Amino acid sequence: MVADAGATLQALHQLTIAEGWGLPVLPGTSHITVGGAIASDVHGKNHAQQGSFGQHLLGLDLMLGCGDIVRMSPETTPDGFWATVGGMGLTGIIVSATIQLQRLETSYLRVERGKTRTLEESMDLIAASTQTPSHAVAWIDATHHQLRGLVDISTPATAGMLPAALQGTPMSPHGPTMRSMASFPGQGIINRRSVAAANAVRWRFPGNNGPKIVHFTTALNTLDGADFWPAAFGKQGLIQYQFSVPANGVHILRRVLEDLQSAGHAPALAVLKSFGAAGKGLLSFPQPGWTLALDFPAQTLGLTTVLSHLDEVVATAGGRVYLTKDSRLSASMLPRMYPELLHWQQIRNLKREDVSSSARGSSPASDCRSALKN
């Protein structure tokens, strides 16, 4: 499919699902644009099998600062292409993209929920699921001393698995819709006591009476049905701290959560996923190992100091913070987390001789193109 960069993932599915096609990679919301998905090189809950969004691109058109439009692909312009995929929109304006879709038998998933008593049990369930086509995610009770959790494993549902009520609509594109919701007044309703109580109820009553057949958007685009969540944090909103660590740094996950408990800053929400092989995007976030996303009330006193401490822990372990969700990472920390940063900068920046030739009166368009043509 050739898609305008301003089209949302939801808009794409309104067209493709009826024809039996879908996007191989879906992040937590379908309301982001194609251009945003490329610039962030977004990932889903099936990274171990499908990688990130950029790995399913056949090509893209990029408008440079001079207005010149460059057609890029992994084969013809690998440097510029992989600097743009995951490049946070800093190489130019993505105009359109050609995406390789995947065949679907139905638009439903079979979801099984497992209840775990420790962080390690949750990781074991996720790791076991990577051997088959599946989407795996764990909710971790970060207020509990053993870091218990719930693990959802979703696999494609065949037509024969659908209940009678869905037999007539195996390829429905419709799922949850997101509505805007006014923030709760003041500091909202998210605090240490309310989170601990809600987590205890959620773990005790997980609602897993056997496998369920659910629409793929319900299972994968969970943020689209949780419009209340940002509002619950009050007018100052929330900060999400998402980081990844390599496979040999799994102990860092427990250390981070225990350090947060000790500091009195257990996150309101903790979500764990696994990553497979890294893609070729120079600033792409996923790397083989694990990623943990943590939500905190933005007004939390002392949070900046705690997160800066975690930056050091994560970087020392060979991990990184997700730039798409970051608003506070220091400039000195960036090259430690993203070792290809210098290479990316070299591709992005105009060469000195190109700038000099432009000053002598040569075509700005040709100089502009030369920076990202390879």
Image (cartoon, rainbow, N blue to C red):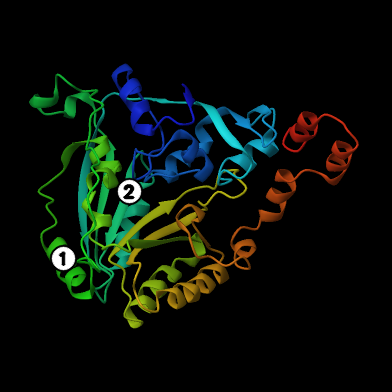
Q: Is residue 205 above or below residue 275?
A: below
* Of residues 60 and 148, the one drawn nearer to the viewer in this rendering: 60
Disc number for residue 198: 1
Disc number for residue 136: 2
CA–CA distance in space, label 2 to label 1: 22 Å
Q: Tell me, yes or no, if residue 356 can be seen here.
A: yes
Residue 251 is left or right of residue 217, and the answer is right
* Of residues 203 and 62, the one drawn nearer to the viewer in this rendering: 62
At x 50%, y 73%, the residue is 308
Q: Which quadrant of the figure contains the C terminus?
A: top right
Percent x, y of residue 43:
44, 45
What amino acid is labelled 2 in the image? Ala
Residue 368 is left or right of residue 289, and the answer is right
* Of residues 43 and 230, the one drawn nearer to the viewer in this rendering: 230
What amino acid is labelled 1 in the image? Ala
Percent x, y of residue 42:
46, 44
